[in-house]
C-alpha cells in the first residue's frame, strides 16, 4: 500500500513539475512575441518613413531647375577652391555598404 502511495505522489509531483515548466515556457514565448511585435511595428513605421523620404528626395531632384543646378555647382566650386570638399556618402570609407567588419583574428593587438 505504501508503495502505491509513493508512486501516486511521484506521478503527482512529476505532473506538477511538467505543468510548471510548460507554463514558464508559454510565458517566455508570450514575452518574446510581444517584443518581436514591437520590433516589427518599429521596422514597419521606419519603412514608411524611408519610403516617404525617398519620395521627397526624388521629388526634390525632379524640381531642381537649371538655375538651382547652377547655384549648387557654384557653391561646390567655391568649397573646392577653399579646400573643403562637400560631403559625399559614396566616397566616405566608413559608410561603405559592401564592407564587412573584420574578423576577430584580423585585429592587430
Image (tube, rainbow, N blue to C red):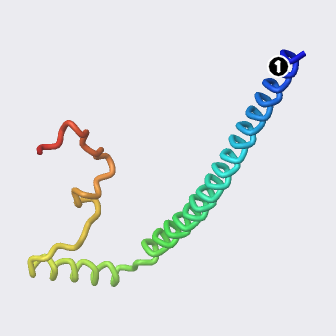
Q: Residues within 10 Å of mark 1 (few under 14, many from 20)?
A: few
- Report x, y in % for residue 10: 78, 24
Residue at (63% x, 49% y) in the render: 32
Is residue 9 shown above or below 67? above
User: Can you identify the residue that label 1 sits on?
Assistant: 7
For this rendering, which residue is in front, 93 or 107? 107
Is residue 88 shown above or below 34? below
Which residue in the rendered view is the most extreme toward the right? 1
- Report x, y in % for residue 54: 49, 66
Is residue 90 shown above or below 64? above
Q: As drawn, is 29 to the left or to the right of 78?
A: right
Is residue 107 shown above or below 83? above
Tell me the quarter of the image containing the N terminus. top right
Q: As drawn, is 36 to the left or to the right of 8?
A: left
Q: As drawn, is 1 to the left or to the right of 71?
A: right
Quarter holding residue 109:
top left
Q: Secondary structure at mark 1?
A: helix
Residue at (28% x, 80% y) in the render: 72
Residue at (12% x, 43% y) in the render: 108
Quarter holding residue 7:
top right
For this rendering, which residue is in front, 89 or 35? 35
Amino acid at each position: 500500500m505504501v508503495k502505491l502511495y509513493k508512486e501516486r505522489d511521484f506521478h503527482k509531483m512529476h505532473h506538477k513539475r511538467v505543468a510548471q515548466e510548460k507554463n514558464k515556457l508559454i510565458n517566455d514565448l508570450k514575452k518574446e512575441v510581444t517584443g518581436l511585435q514591437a520590433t516589427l511595428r518599429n521596422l514597419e513605421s521606419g519603412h514608411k518613413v524611408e519610403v516617404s523620404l525617398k519620395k521627397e528626395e526624388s521629388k526634390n531632384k525632379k524640381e531642381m531647375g537649371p538655375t538651382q543646378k547652377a547655384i549648387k555647382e557654384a557653391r561646390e566650386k567655391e568649397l573646392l577652391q577653399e579646400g573643403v570638399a562637400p560631403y559625399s556618402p559614396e566616397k566616405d570609407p566608413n559608410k561603405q555598404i559592401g564592407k564587412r567588419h573584420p574578423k576577430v583574428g584580423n585585429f592587430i593587438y
